[in-house]
Image (spheres, coloured by chain):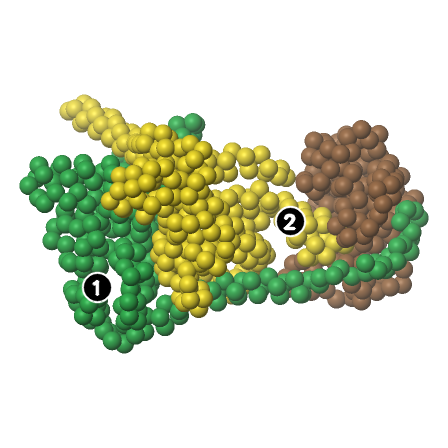
Amino acid sequence: MGPSGCGKTTLIRCINRMHELIPDARVSGKIFLDHEDIYATDPIIVRRQIGMVFQKPNPFPTMSIHDNVIAGYNLNGIPLTKDEKKKIAEESLRKAALWEEVKESLHRKGTFLSGGQQQRLCIARALAMGPAVLLLDEPTSALDPKATSHIEELIVQLKDTVSIILVTHNMAQAARVSDFAAFVYLGELVEFGPSGRMFTAPKDKRTEAYLTGKFG
Amino acid sequence: MKEPSIRRRILYDKFFKMIIVLLTFCSILPMFFILFFITSKGISVINWRFLTHLPKPVGEMGGGISNAIIGTLMLIGISTVFSVPVGILAGIFLSENRKGKLASLTRLCVETLQGIPSIVIGIIAYIWLVITMGSFSALSGGVALGLMMLPVIITATEETLKLIPESLREASLALGVSYPRTILKVILPAGVSGIVTGILLSIARVAGETAPLLFTAFGSPYMNLNVLKPVNSLPLMIFNYATSPYPEWHTLAWGASFILIVLVLGLNLFTKGVTRRWKVQF
Amino acid sequence: MNHSRAEVLVLGTKTETMRWHKPALSESSFRRILSITGAFVLLLLLAIFFSLVIASFPAIRNFGVRFLFSATWDPVRSEFGTFPFLVGTLATSFLALLISVVFSIPISIFVGEYSAQGSTPAFIKSMIELLAGVPSVIYGFCGLFLLAPLVRTLEVRLGVAPYGVGIFTASLVLSIMIIPYSASIGREVISLVPSDLKEAALSLGATRFEVIRKVILPYAGSGIVAGILLSLGRALGETMAVTMVIGNSNFIPKGIFSPANTLASVVANEFTEATGSLYLASLIELGLVLFIVTTLINLIGKLIIRRMGVGE
């Protein structure tokens, strides 16, 4: 968490190496996933193990809901039988709490869904790849409060299946759903610790100032 | 004392607007004249025989434009084969490299290519193909038309792909999809309507071209399906018949003009109407 | 494709690291292919230019600058001077430009300012676009059979030689053909004039006419000029319609109703009958001149437009 422009999105994009899309981007340091240095691996493989959901829902507009969910397999040219695809799609949509709402319209394009539903579709799409970690970059800032609370419930459920790294500028949201919290300010990781302690007894003065609303 | 001045200004204003409206509507009159005359003179010539028979020598009645129709289709086919793959790839190159020296230079070249007069393109195709092959041919005509289609397709592809939001690319890359696959399987399909529009519009443009074919495809009174031999085309035939001294040939030229204008304008209208429906919503 | 499938059904916080194969085409190879296509376009243009230069070399070497100023075009004696064609080209193009501007600027003002929304401007825009889509040979055909007789009647009434074809007819046909080019660019620059400038003038009590004359046209002026330049470039290179109505005479035209030839029309008329390498090289050199002149004019026009920030 942190105020706008503090660098949290940049940080999270370093984790699945999406920052490399920007020319002249540099990074130093190491990030390990299961004891493997992700900067020593092919970024494509990293991204298959670390999924990402973006601020604005971005389902593929030319594909049906079903094809959107298994897009990771189709686009990568990984052969699966029709049944396997259906199975993965259903499992992922169930995990994203979207299955009941779309099970009758899997062949339709996803653009008729509401913002919250589209975001859950994107979560299902990321989950279908079986990632070890799921990165959520301000996933609810483009959504209305009802959709936001749906997604927050979903995040709490998903914690059992994937490790989730959530970026948010809404500290109440951070307090609601997280087990650990990191406060980033002006490009610096100021403090990191269990949420229980962070939100009640922060160690750093800047964290305390942010939490009490002195800036942000 | 201010009164007449204001009244005069208002008068000028009204007068000006009248002139503007008048001139505007006058300028679209030629379109109606052309359509009217071609239809009225050409439509009576159209019948099944006209469309399926070969032209006859002067003096003999009947005769048709079948070889011109086939020739036009052949030339369009060849030019499309040459220009579409290169054009789309170059368009992708330009949209993926907004800055960069090679991209800027290429963009300049595309603009220059677009402005080259069609007869100069014909000269080039003559130098490159007709001289080397030793004869006129459909191939050289097709290449000339392809050269004319190329810049239109490149520009249409570039402009279409530039409009596709970055979020689509990010969604694909975040799934671990490689860059080439992202471009070819996600970005390109999303831009298909704009690219197809560009291709269809460039076909409409070259279907009516005569100058580049004057000394490449050259024309022929026979039906020819051999790419290495001369071939007739609708505009070529219209030119030859219209400038001939034989009234029977003039009549045939009106008929051919009707077919050509239906083809070209039809393609234009079709492109506008239908491809809008294929447009992808983001 | 060889790959080992991981346990695809997803569970747990860790999955087996998925050793899927790398894609067949790597990013750098793909980027290289794209760059090669870009370079190909560049080479294409250079090849066009140099082919023209090399093929016209016999004529360049033989005539030099005299080529442009001599008035004798005599294939029999292998004397090739292109001055008559330069006159024909410039005369038809500039006359056509003058006539077309009378219509294209009003169109730009009408669709850009007076009636910018709704079905009327959409209709007019479509009509103008269709005008641009009509093939050149059809313009020539209609010009020859519909316009030329009218011009002939006019010439009879004026007491000039009643050719019917000639510079005047060609300019008329050409002017209709180039209207769309300056009209569409003019419309764009006019519609880009910021509304707060217009509103400021209107709130001071100016009439629409005065706003157009004193605010819009000065602001959009260079863009309109650029559009006119572009239509000039088009006019210079136009071949078929002009060839069919210009009368095909290789002498310097005496007046506006004289037959003539343009650079493009003489190439169209004589290329297939050119015997002898000097004849052909001279015709190709005409193509080279056309190439250089139209390229320069088009690039200048596009540069001005880009400076004005017009884009789609």
Kind of element beneath mark 1: loop
Q: Which residue is mark 1?
A: C82
Q: Position of residue A47 (x, y in %)?
A: 78, 55
Which of the chains is green? C
Numbered disc 2: what chain?
B
Q: Pinpoint residue C294: horizontal percent, then vertical percent.
A: 33, 58
Mark 1 or 2: the one toward you:
1
Query: Chain B shown in which color?
Result: yellow
| Mark drawn on residue A79 | none
User: Residue A92 falls in which quadrant of the image?
Assistant: top right
- What is the quadrant of residue A103 in the picture? top right
Report the residue marked by disc 2. B187
Residue drawn at (36%, 72%), measured in percent from left and top?
C54
| Callouts 1 and 2 on one subunit | no
Judging by colour alone, the chain drawn in brown in this rendered image is A
Q: Residues within 10 Å of mark 2 (few under 14, many from 20)?
A: many
Q: Is residue A7 visible?
A: no
**Amino acid of disc 2:** Ile
Q: Which quarter of the rendered picture does the N terminus of chain C lie within?
A: bottom right
Along the horizontal axis of the image, is C79 left or right of A156? left
Which chain does the residue under circle 1 lie in? Answer: C
> What amino acid is found at the position of numbered circle 1 in the picture?
Thr
> What is the spatial separation of the Cα atoms under label 1 and label 2, in whole angstroms?
51 Å
Q: Residue furthest left?
A: C159
